[in-house]
Image (spheres, rainbow, N blue to C red):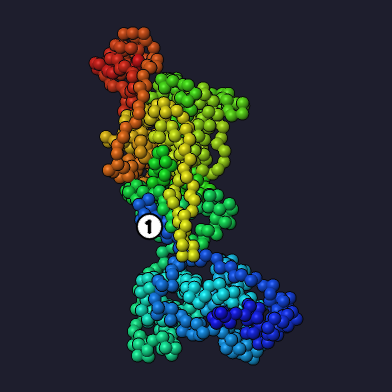
Amino acid sequence: MPNKRSGGGLSPTQQAAKFLGVSVLAGAVMAGIALPAVGALGLAAKGSVEGFDELPANLKQPPLSQRTTILDSKGDQIATVYSRDRTVVDLKEISPYMQQAIIAIEDARFYQHGAIDLKGVLRALNRNAQSGGVTQGASTLTQQLVKNVAVEEAGDDPTLVAQATQQTLGRKIKELKQAIQLEEELGKKKILENYLNITFFGQQAYGVEAASRRYFSKSAKDLKVEEAALLAGIVQSPSRYDPVNDPQEATKRRNTVLQRMADVGDIAQAEADEAKEKPLGLDISKPKNGCITAVMGAGFFCDYVREVFLNDPVFGKTAEERAKIWNQGGLTIQTTMDPKAQKSVQASIKDHVNQKDEVATAATIVEPGTGKILGMGQSRPYGMDVKQNETTINLSVDQSMGGGAGYQPGSTFKPIVAAAALEGGMPATKSYSAPYKMEYPSPISVCGGKNWVNNASPRSTLTNENETEVGPYSMKRATALSVNTYFVQMIADIGICPVTEMAEKMGVERADGRNMDQAPSIALGTQEMSPLTMANAYATFAARGMYCTPIAIESITQRVGGESKSLEVPKSTCSRAMSENTADTINTLLRGVVEDGTGTQAGLGSRPSAGKTGTTDFRYAAWFVGYTPNMAGAVWVGDPAHERRMVNITIGGRTYAKVFGGEVPGPIWRDMMSGALEGEPAPDFTLVNIPEERPDRGRGDNDNDNGGNDNGNGDDEGGLIGGTDGGTFPTPEFTIPEGFIQGQGNGGNNGNGNGGFG
């Protein structure tokens, strides 16, 4: 039975020829029948129905681009992102008034004609012939849908958009055939549904659902007659009839649509007249697009999710494929971000570092054993206003993922050196002379069977933080006090290659993507890293030696053509980076840092924690990286431009003569972790017993040996410095190394002074 709506059963070619005024003899060969004036209007190579037949037979109808919604781990919305703000809905979810209004004003005979309205075509051909060009369209809704699909396919490419909208008879003929094909395949109801979902309604709203929410803050299914008429009127010229910028013109256009609905019998005249008297009734919802709108300060985490999608081959073999899927949208992305952890990160940052400070801070929390990123934030907000210290550079991640070139982690790298040494068989009781100042040992073995040689002139040297830091030191005490010369002597013993190999196993790499330098200075943290890299590396210690690649995405579903499908997402890959015993030993060493070392200000009270401070040369950066068995976090403070030294500086309203890793980053870490861990279990580490071997310090055999200075005689084992004039030692700047025995000495002129250390 012929389909009246699609041309009475004629083929697309026959229908096209008929609508163009060419007589068709049933079954006759169509070759050689010319289409008038085609050659003059840009289709010379296709000046016959044979040429028409060579046009694409099937209309490509790509999935409509929609908004993507990014959720936290609890399912609550973080942000929406889109190239075009659109939410595709079924026809049954669109108000009948809206359906009637768009047909009445755009194509009143929609249900009576086929893909092309012959009366409209003849009228347009007559007008165009009189003008000598193409001045009137007579396009049906189906033809408009074909054009809109072409525009959708063109995306943001201006050349393709121009081709999709050019006013030539050639494009019209192509559009005509595709419209016929579309009606045969879809039928009127589906065409109307697709049209209402693809059409641009101004104010960044594509599709009627987005338009309804933009102008009236309601769903399209709830539109009243006057509201539907307003939206239908916008379509012809979204800028001219914009109700936000020109309400008078929009009102006139709305009333025209209402009258047209009455004229075609969709509504009574009285209903139309009543609706015309009503105000526009706008209830504007401003578009919320992109990571800049993210809640909980999660703009940079949102941006990291986008970077993961655009860079991971699991979402498409090529960058172009991945970008196409992302821009197409319709994704619901559930992430690993824990709202409690994220809020705690941002609250701690706000309490300690101001947005307009000369330096910034960035912090990240990950979950040991899973690689899940739980929180990510920084003091400089996500945005484009440089004067307000806003930035779109994610200071927590590597350069390839939208971050900067990284920041030297300083002494937070030392535990990686210690882990390499322990894995190589070094005992945890190992001691070194660790002088205050020394030349870099030379030669030191590097990867590839070569050696690093200290051949600078003069030879390169290094010092400890304070002149009072003079060995010998044990591993435990050297870690607690962060003694530079100790760890350089260690790396000289084991070689550089085991250290870089251990770093690689723990996912530690330079933020700029370069290979790590094969030099002993890496023991002091000279290679630029990101906070995410350092947090996830320390999570390896917390997970007793298991390294897991960081992940930000739990699941993704995509809505295509009214149906949802699940997409594959990258999974964390875990591997053993070191033995459990090595990790347990590091945990024991780093627990000492927060108990009585340089990181006491980062302590979490009764909750077991471990970590390491880091302060770079010239104080361009300061760090604290720490963990509990169930969370690991890194905090960096510094100038992203690597220009402002942190001396005589005000941060968060407080002035510092010198910034140390335990003094500024430490409290930030403490507060963010305290909030993130509130209500969570407080498991302990598996600790190991590290006997304290007493390194020789000073001269002396037994009682009464010279205490290392002429001012006192040690009454116990030989000391370093005797009492002076009744004074005391150590000074406030120097801490007695653990395991040393303090002897009593004669205090010179004024009685007893403290003796040295044996």
Residue occupying the far front of the picture: 1
Is the residue 433 above or below the residue 371 in the image? above
Q: Residue at x 36, y 40 (%)?
A: 631
Residue situated in front as seen by the camera: 52 or 37: 52
Task: Place residue 93 in its image quadrant.
Answer: bottom left
Is residue 743 found left or right of 331 in the rendered image? left
Q: Residue at x 54, y 25 (%)?
A: 495
- Where is residue 709 drawn, in percent x and y? 36, 15
Q: Quadrant of the N terminus?
A: bottom right
Which type of secondary structure does the marked residue at label 1 adopt?
A: strand
Identify which amino acid the numbered label 1 is placed on.
Gln
Does residue 215 appear anywhere in the picture?
no
Q: Residue at x 44, y 66 (%)?
A: 87
Q: Quadrant of the C terminus?
A: top left
- Where is residue 167 drawn, in percent x and y? 62, 79
Is residue 708 found left or right of 445 in the rendered image? left
Residue situated in front as seen by the camera: 114 or 358: 114
* Residue wearing tag 1: 77
Task: Place residue 601 in its image quadrant.
Answer: top left
- Where is residue 132 drawn, in percent x and y? 66, 88
Does residue 702 appear anywhere in the picture?
yes
Is residue 578 found left or right of 497 in the rendered image? left
Q: Residue at x 35, y 36 (%)?
A: 628
Residue situated in front as seen by the camera: 187 or 308: 187
- Where is residue 78 drawn, in percent x and y? 39, 56
